[in-house]
Image (cartoon, rainbow, N blue to C red):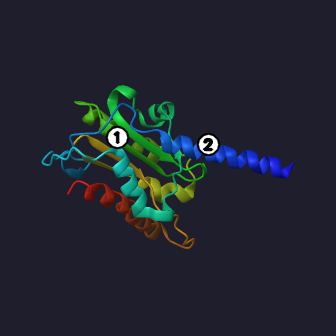
């Protein structure tokens, strides 16, 4: 009986992994990417070859085994948790961890033409909602508070991500600094693609 359960669980996890990796851009290829600032919109560069997949891969590479999200966020949850409706984006990659105790979220959006401000506002609101949610696990609060929204042209990225702080004796300031340093790795990975 145990072998059957293990086989079923393995098949289910494999199917989730394949499904999560197979969903390409939601509405087509990415194009028109200008320069980057944190929650800014400097449009001085034009790079038509970067995609949401490129950005996600760069972020994953920056964290290596400390990248915890491993499950795709479906369009319904994307709308419910982040306020992003399908008419707001041409392409999106969004992931969260399968283990619900981890707060990590990475959302990368290529906004529909003329909707980048709406996307950025929705992601800022999503961050504020997370910060104000009193039902969060205390261990996740530094990471939630360190969340960054970065923008470059029509791309906007929500980064609540980073390694787990193994220092159980860290004081509030140390935990805050650890979380900020971790999320900065994702910010740097995002920005490096637009140089």
Name the residue that disc number 1 marks: 109
- Mark 1 lies on a secondary structure that is strand
Q: Spatial distance from mark 2 to mark 1, Cα to Cα?
A: 25 Å
Could you tell which of marks 2 and 1 lies nearer the N-terminus?
A: 2
Say if residue 146 shows up in the picture: no
Q: Is residue 28 left or right of residue 37?
A: right
Which mark is on residue 85? none
- Mark 2 lies on a secondary structure that is helix
Q: Residue at x 39, y 28 (%)?
A: 86
Q: Residue at x 31, y 44 (%)?
A: 156
Name the residue that disc number 2 marks: 15
Displayed quadrant of residue 161: bottom left
Q: Is residue 108 left or right of residue 155?
A: right
Binning the other alpha carbons within 10 Å of mark 2 as few (below 14), some (14 to 19) or many (20 upward) gives few
Vertical relation: 18 (above or below) 187: above
Residue 48: percent from the left, percent from the top? 21, 43
Nearer the observer, 151 or 62: 62
Residue 98: percent from the left, percent from the top? 59, 48
Residue 56: percent from the left, percent from the top? 39, 51
Q: Residue at x 48, y 46 (%)?
A: 95
Residue farthest to the top, as pictured: 87
- The C terminus lies in which quarter of the figure? bottom left
Say if residue 131 shows up in the picture: yes
Task: Please report contact status of discs 2 and 1: CB closer than 8 Å, yes or no.
Answer: no
Nearer the observer, 139 or 79: 79
Residue farthest to the left, as pictured: 44
Nearer the observer, 138 or 36: 36
């Amino acid at each position: 009986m145990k072998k059957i359960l293990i086989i079923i669980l393995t098949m289910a996890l494999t199917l989730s992994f394949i499904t999560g990796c197979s969903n390409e851009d939601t509405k087509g290829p990415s194009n028109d990417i200008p320069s980057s600032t944190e929650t800014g919109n400097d449009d001085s560069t034009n790079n038509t070859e970067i995609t949401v997949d490129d950005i996600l891969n760069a972020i994953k590479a920056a964290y290596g085994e400390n990248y915890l999200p491993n499950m795709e966020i479906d369009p319904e949850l994307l709308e419910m948790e982040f306020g992003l409706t399908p008419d707001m984006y041409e392409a999106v990659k969004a992931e969260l961890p399968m283990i619900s105790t981890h707060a990590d979220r990475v959302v990368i959006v290529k906004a529909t033409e003329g909707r980048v401000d709406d996307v950025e506002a929705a992601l800022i609101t999503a961050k504020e909602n997370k910060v104000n949610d009193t039902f969060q696990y205390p261990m996740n609060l530094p990471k939630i508070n360190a969340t960054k929204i970065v923008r470059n042209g029509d791309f906007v990225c929500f980064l609540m991500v980073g390694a787990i702080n193994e220092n159980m004796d860290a004081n509030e300031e140390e935990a805050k600094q650890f979380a900020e340093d971790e999320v900065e790795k994702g910010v740097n990975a995002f920005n490096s693609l637009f140089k």
